Amino acid sequence: MVTDIKKIGNAVWEIPMTHKEGMNVPARIYATEKLLKEMDEGVYDQITNVACLPGIQKAALCMPDGHWGYGYPIGGVAAFDLDTGIISPGGIGFDINCGMRLIKTDLTYDEVKPKLKLLVDTLFKMVPSGVGGKGFARLNRYQFKEVMTDGVKWCVDNGYGWKEDLDRIEENGQIKGADPSNVSDRAIGRGMNQLGTLGSGNHYLEIQVANKENIYDKQIAKAFGITKDGQVVIMIHCGSRGFGHQVASDYLETFEPVMKKYGIKVKDRQLACAPFNSKEGQKYFSAMVCAANMAFANRQVIMHQVRKGFSEVFGRSEEDLGMNLIYDVAHNIAKVEEYDVDGKKKKLVVHRKGSTRSFPPGHPELLPAYRKTGQPVIIGGSMETGSYLLVGTKKAMEETFGSTAHGSGRTMSRAKAKHGVRGEKLQKDMEARGIYVKTASMSGLAEEAGIAYKDISEVVKATEEAGISKAVVGLKPIGNIKG
Amino acid sequence: MPYRILEDEATADVAYVVTGKSLAAVLKDSAISMLDTIAERKSISKKIKKEIKLDSIDAGKLLYNFLQEIIYLKDAGNIVFSEVNVRAKEKKSSKGSIFSLNATLFGDRIDSSRQKMKADVKAVTLHMFSMKKTGKGWRAKIVFDI
């Protein structure tokens, strides 16, 4: 750990500007003492490198689930001035708008348990996962471009969802400013067949239960749609698949020579960036929005299949099963948002890479359904331990550019996890513990074992101690589809 | 194994070091490291043949573009490969070198009901990426985004 880090508040630690030559702001890490001790050494180096970027405001931040990433750490939050600051694919992540979606049902665990295996097997067939999973929605190039600009609206217009779904998604699932002409043919080629697919890696579709003892705020839980003991919900974690990765790769290459043109020097190739208001920066922003809209649409089409699967297994309509969308959040994205900086309102381009927006009650950008409660925040854990539904806070607006954690955060490499765990054994052990898992890859399953991740409850505790989000419901897994 | 996995690099992804006596050997074995990450190669038949021809003034760029092309064929063509053959050369001139490759790959359409798939490689990252001439031949360091 670095020697000059100091505790400056509850679960907040600061590395001063004197730590490294070129730091324009301090770096701050949000963590309990336990999490801070466990944090990768790389995080300290990376977050202080981010603090050196031009136009960065207040501080370079790392959330409690932070771990080493490319250029920026995962869990990184950085906000830049629109005129003097930059936009960077490394600050967003390769999987643009990787995010979480939570769907409620009116079913309870007792009703689902007898059909759990059939349900998971059915969903496994209906939602393509793993390498090369082709989506059932076959699109031509023209339609795919519509997805880039219209996002979830395209899905609803084409029968993949309900109109009211739009009111339960960050930015209504359609971020403005998409320009498909700034997206390469290669990216389109990679993404066209992938709408409605989970992918692999840490992506999953999970059936979870909200038990009474894990409902921490009854009133807000009710407003979010969690009203009874043992209520079953479905969580989806995935992003923009090969499409977003190609957009990120394309612009990382574009930005390397661009930095020379604008006289920008960075401490790591993966921090490649361009001035936000430059021609190149704006092109990337509009291409990134295309990928973000595709990711919202991807999760929407997957939800459409999940609703159909539940309806088939339980012999009841999706509406009758109460399968309303609770919320969909992006955790790999850059967005223009307004914050108080030195007592003045200022628009900034906020990069969140493995960090969830956490807007408080009353925020004007919140959809009417959640303006009173604050924004639902979905933090996904490992498939063995569970996940959390939280709510955004005022403190997050004041301190972390309206951001909080996004998941557990890995502590062990994929290669090491596979040494300690065999996929087949893990699957059996989990079944004995009441979690039925179907996977496209046994080695992929081993890589995602719970031992490879931080303790999610400690991550949530850190966000609560720091006041940047507040736990509403803890969710326990009972069925999982692993890509 | 023609490559070595770096267990402590890239917590969420996978990193390799590939060494070989020739440029062609390192290009080939780098592709093999990626294909072994994606699937059990033994389970992939050799029904489809694809050729990739590339050149660059930078050997690293040549390797990067070669690997990206294989990723593109996986996603856009739904093809995964089990065999890779590479011919490569360095053409020197007064202005510098031009590196070129001519690769032939054999594989099949992805069908997980018949094939044993592992992890999806979605990008070649620039993190620690290198391709260098050494006293004994060539050495590459690659991190794949999973």
Image: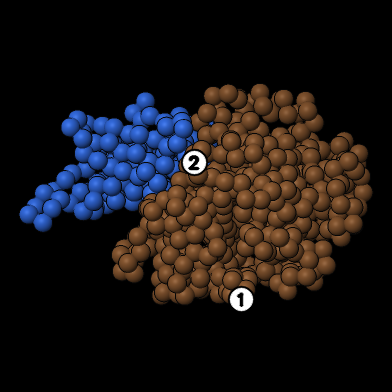
Chain colours: A brown, B blue
| Label drawn at residue A444 | none
Q: Residue at x 73, y 54 (%)?
A: A467
Along the viewing direction, whichever of B76 and A56 lies nearer the viewer: A56
Q: Amino acid at mark 1?
A: Lys
Q: How many marks?
A: 2
Residue A267 against residue A459 in the figure, above or below: below
Q: Can you give x and y, in whole percent of width and height, for residue A336 in the image?
A: 58, 71
Residue A142 in the figure: left or right of residue B60: right
Q: Quadrant of the C terminus of chain A?
A: top right
The answer to which quarter of the image holds residue A376 is: bottom right
Q: Amino acid at mark 2?
A: Val
The answer to which quarter of the image holds residue B104 is: top left
Sequence-first tag of 2 and 1: 2
Q: Residue at x 63, y 30 (%)?
A: A451
Q: Residue at x 86, y 37 (%)?
A: A113
Residue B61 in the figure: left or right of residue B89: right
Q: Chain of mark 1?
A: A
Which secondary structure, mark 2? loop
Q: Is residue A120 visible?
A: no
Q: Can you give x and y, in whole percent of width and height, for residue A4 in the image?
A: 50, 44
**Crowding near pointer 2: few (<14 within 10 Å), some, many (20+)?**
few
Q: Can you give x and y, in whole percent of width and height, for residue B93 in the image?
A: 9, 52
Along the viewing direction, whichever of B64 and B118 lies nearer the viewer: B64
Q: Chain of mark 2?
A: A
Q: Can you give x and y, in whole percent of width and height, for residue A115 in the image?
A: 84, 38
Q: Which residue is mark 1?
A: A344
Q: Which residue is mark 2?
A: A2
